[in-house]
Amino acid sequence: MKELTEHATLLRWVAQAQAHDFEYSLGQLSGLSSHLPMAVIALARLGASDERLDEFGRRYSPRLRPFGRSADRVDAKNWRQTLGQSDLGPDYVAFFQREVQSRGRDATLRAYLPTLVPGVSGAAFHALIRLAYGLDAELDSEVTYGLAYWSVAYLELGEIPDCGVPCSEPDDLLSQVRQSPPLPSGAPSTGSGLIFDRMAEVASRPGFATYAGAFAPNDDALRRLALASARLFSATADFIALHAVTATHALRLALPYLGNEQRALRYFWQALLGAYVTIGCPELRATPLEIPEWNEIMTRAIHSNDEHVIKLVYTCSREEAHYRNELFQRIAAQKIANV
């Protein structure tokens, strides 16, 4: 794939994104993740022209709010204690910039990501996704922003116990959850309405920890999680399920830096379980439809102004290339059907 580190138009829009906060508000809803850097990276990977990147960036960027300045409130001594504090974004960016400059990108990732893994649910996977897109584009500055966002959005869903009969098949576990009355499904009736708040609420329900602890990753666990996420989207076309698909792709890119892989996969499973229960524990089944060629799917995604269409199609193109499974082309086609 084409290197993006010298793509001037892309770099200009990534820099524009980095001059703005990780999140923005829309009407009465706040805490929405900025998709500008991820969308322009995905567009560039899909083959969009410079003019198309400019058009998308100009349309998207007015919703963003300027980033504050660092007051150097985060350092190597207190960075763990301040996880989850949303007002420290500029301070975390400055901290990780210093770390990447002194240690190098990969060493910084290996030093800090294992501590961040339990909070992978933060911002409904968007921090993980933003970091992974930085890795995909080989943009160290964007990796730094991904680390900082993960730090301020950090959200744990509780300890993961070792319980029950271990299972290595996510689909089987999701089916058990669907059929098990001890774990009530559905979205909460209170709260902000944001995905991550809903995930946190369902994680407090009776029985959640049991199913979170029942997953035993094997050597094929990442592929199984990716396919389970894709089947969930195929069955529902749900907005939360879409994020599960893009997050499993992001997990694949970030996994070499997350420390103990089984531990990382278990925390990701916990977050995926939270998303599944939030949706309402649907049955996983494929939706029949006519599947166009990839060129048509990608062309329609490039011309879409929906950042989620763009990201999902790019994700699916890369996941199909990696796993050699047509399911990813199917759900990409499903998403662009009405574009």
Image (cartoon, rainbow, N blue to C red):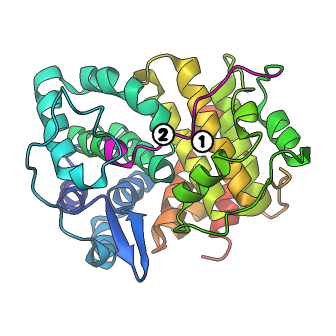
The stretch of residues the image draws in magenta is 150-164
Residue type (three-letter) at the residue carrying disc 1: Ala
Compared across the picture, whether 99 is left or right of 58 comes to: left
Which disc is residue 271 wearing? 1
Residue 23 location, x and y as percent?
A: 34, 63
Residue type (three-letter) at the residue carrying disc 2: Val
Residue pictured at 24% horizontal, 33% vertical: 79
* Residue matched to label 2: 120
Was residue 172 drawn as part of the magenta stretch in this picture? no
Compared across the picture, whether 63 is left or right of 325 comes to: left
Residue pictured at 89% horizontal, 48% vertical: 181
Is residue 129 visible in the rendered image? The answer is yes
Indicate which disc, 1 or 2, sits on the residue closer to the N terminus. 2
Residue pictured at 75% horizontal, 43% vertical: 206
* Of 253 and 194, the residue lying toward us: 194
Compared across the picture, whether 117 is left or right of 113 comes to: right
Quadrant in the picture for residue 278: bottom right
* Of 29 and 230, the residue lying toward us: 29
Residue 56 location, x and y as percent?
A: 34, 72
**Label 1: few (<14), some or many (≥20) within 10 Å?**
many
Question: Dot 1 lies on which element?
Answer: helix
Q: Marks 1 and 2: CB-CB under 8 Å? A: yes
Was residue 153 drawn as part of the magenta stretch in this picture? yes
